[in-house]
Image: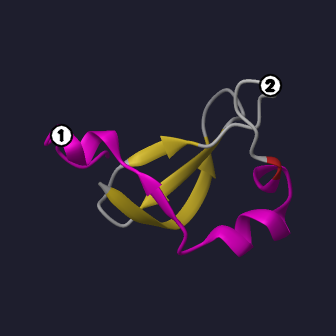
């Protein structure tokens, strides 16, 4: 299920995590060549993606919101 990004935070290892409007969190790493998300590397790039949607596998499985 696609859910809009409402914010971001860094996890304990320094990786960016998108906060989704459903209450779930999802890592948004830029790790070429496997995952290419150059927008996550700058504050401007992350700001431009607010409101963009990500597929939330946690919603698809019926998981409760993250804390």
Residue drawn 18% across and 40% down?
A: 63
Left or right? Give the position of 53 relative to 34.
Answer: left
Cα separation between marks 2 and 1: 30 Å
Q: Nearer the viewer, mark 2 or mark 1?
A: 2
Q: Position of residue 54 (x, y in %)?
A: 47, 55
* In the image, residue 5 above or below residue 27: below
Residue 52 point in image, percent of width and height: 55, 69
To which quarter of the image does residue 2 belong? bottom left
| Image point (76%, 37%), residue name | 30
Q: Which quarter shows the N terminus?
A: bottom left
Q: How many residues crowd around disc 2 within 10 Å: few (fewer than 14), some, or many (20 or more)?
A: few
Q: Residues within 10 Å of mark 1 (few under 14, many from 20)?
A: few
9 in the magenta segment: no
Residue 40 position within the rendered picture, expressed as x and y whole percent measured from the top left: 76, 52
**Residue where numbered disc 1 is placed:** 63
Reply above or below: 1 against 50.
above
- Towards the viewer: 36 or 51: 36
Residue depicted at 27% across the width and 40% down the height: 58
Q: Secondary structure at mark 1?
A: loop
Disc marking residue 33: 2
Colouring chosen for the image of the structure: secondary structure
Q: Secondary structure at mark 2?
A: loop
Q: Could you tell whether 27 is left or right of 2 in the image?
A: right
- Give percent across and percent down for residue 33: 80, 25
Magenta highlight range: 39-67
Earlier-in-chain disc, 2 versus 1: 2
């Amino acid at each position: 299920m696609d859910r809009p990004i409402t914010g971001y935070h860094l996890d304990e290892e320094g990786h960016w995590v998108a906060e989704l409007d459903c209450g779930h969190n999802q890592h948004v790493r830029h790790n070429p060549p496997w995952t290419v998300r150059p927008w996550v590397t700058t504050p401007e790039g992350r700001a431009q993606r607010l409101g963009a949607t990500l597929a939330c596998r946690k919603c698809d499985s019926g998981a409760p919101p993250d804390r």
